[in-house]
Image: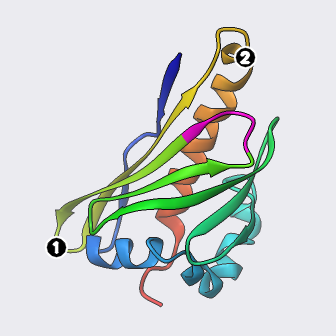
Amino acid sequence: MTSSFESKTVRIAHAVEKVYALLSDLSNLDRFQSVLNAPENKNKLKITGYDSDSLSIEVSPIGSVTFRIVNREPNKTIKFEAENSPLPLNLWIQFVPTGESETASRVSVKADLNPFIKPMVSKPLQEGVDKMADMLVVLPYEQ
């Protein structure tokens, strides 16, 4: 049974082109280690590794999950597929320009969850998409 989880819509104070350019090449995260590791962001998302096309994060209670980019739609969507995950799932980051220098964004996950496991992982998955959306807001896109 497929279940969907969506973050709240967040406002990023940068043009959609800058937001997409940064996030569609995950090796750009090298420039933002200080932001990602700042104490105020530690509870948002724990990133354990990345390269240009993949991002590994710590997900409780599952453990480390790697998301690989499988589709890029410029200035609109980045689609990821989970690897080494006990649950088959996909993740999307969606972008909508809301002004010349503002972008609305939302993180969505679709996962195949059987009725037994759904009650155990629904809350952590929802918290995960919300934390990921919160992290999108604090990245310094201007650097």
Q: Where is 112 relative to 118, above or below?
A: below
- Mark 1 highlights which residue? 100
Q: Residue at x 61, y 66 (%)?
A: 54
Q: Nearer the viewer, residue 26 or 42?
A: 26
Q: Secondary structure at mark 1?
A: loop
Q: Nearer the viewer, residue 20 or 70?
A: 70
x, y percentage for residue 89? Answer: 57, 38
Q: Where is 131 relative to 26, above or below?
A: above
- Mark 2 highlights which residue? 117
Q: Which residues are magenta?
A: 85-89
Relative to 72, is 109 on the left or the right?
right
The amino acid beneath tag 2 is: Ile
| Label whose residue precedes the other's in the sequence (2 or 1) | 1
Q: Residue at x 50, y 22 (%)?
A: 2
State yes or no: residue 66 in magenta.
Answer: no
Count neighbours of disc 2 (C-alpha within 10 A) and say few if under 14, some if 14 to 19, many if 20 or more: few
